[in-house]
Amino acid sequence: MGSDSETERSAAKEKKKLNSLMPIAKPLAGKKLCKRTFKLVRRAAESKCLRRGVKEVVKSIRRNQKGLCVIAGNISPIDVITHLPILCEENSIPYIYVPTKEDLANAGATKRPTCCVLVTTKPAKGELDAEVKEKLQSDYDQVVSEVVEITSSMY
């Protein structure tokens, strides 16, 4: 009996997450892609290959850094990030929306909710171990190929 109420609560949470999404949150990652994306963000945060926040992401994109832009879908006000998808498209950077900024912050190893992150494969300083770099690159390639596939099916 307790498990039924658990599933009801989790279903209600999911519905609430989807209701708080902004209308421009497309392409939105599904459950599997969301999990893979958060795993990639977590791995990038551990190896210092992550840019957090609108200012830092925009600065990195303008400096021609390539990567995957992950944007939260429940940002309010919406004007904060409306320029990001356009900037990404102009610079040929794949981007994907995830349902909540809190989940994105948890994956990015920060306590404050984060509205967007840019995952790169090169750290800010120094070099990565071969094994860590290989894992990060394989996760990155897998997620980016799925994001490109979803984006191309939209248009």
Image (cartoon, grey):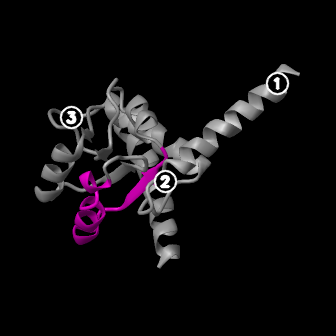
Q: Is residue 149 magenta?
A: no
> Which residue bears the numbered disc 2?
142
| Dot 1 or dot 3, earlier in sequence | 1
Q: Image height check: is 90 above or below 30?
A: below
| CA separation in Å, label 3 and label 2 | 22 Å
Q: CA distance from mark 1 to mark 3?
A: 47 Å
Q: Is residue 131 visible?
A: no
SS for dot 3: loop
Seen as rendered, the residue at the extreme right is 1
- Residue at image point 45% right, 66% down: 148
Among the 4 quarters of the image, the one containing residue 41:
top left
Question: Which residue is depicted at the point 18% across and 56% down?
Answer: 61
Query: Badge 2, how many Cα within 10 Å: few under 14, some, many 20+?
Result: some
The residue at the far bottom in this view is 155
Query: Residue pushed farthest top?
Result: 2
Question: The disc labelled 1 sits on which kind of residue?
Answer: Ser
Residue bearing mark 1: 3
Q: Residues within 10 Å of mark 1 (few under 14, many from 20)?
A: few
Drawn side of residue 136 relative to residue 77, left or right: right
**Rendered image: mark on residue 127:** 3
Which of marks 2 and 3 precedes in the sequence? 3
Q: Is residue 67 above or below residue 115?
A: below
The type of residue carrying mark 3 is: Glu
Expressed as whole percent of the image width and height from the top left, the position of residue 51 reads 24, 41
- The front one of 3 and 152 is 3
Along the viewing direction, whichever of 55 and 139 lies nearer the viewer: 55
Give the residues in magenta: 78-99
Residue under the point 49% across and 53% down: 142
**Residue 85's mark?**
none
* Between discs 1 and 2, the one toward the N terminus: 1
Q: Is residue 97 magenta?
A: yes
Instruction: Give the mark toward the camera: 1 or 2.
Output: 1
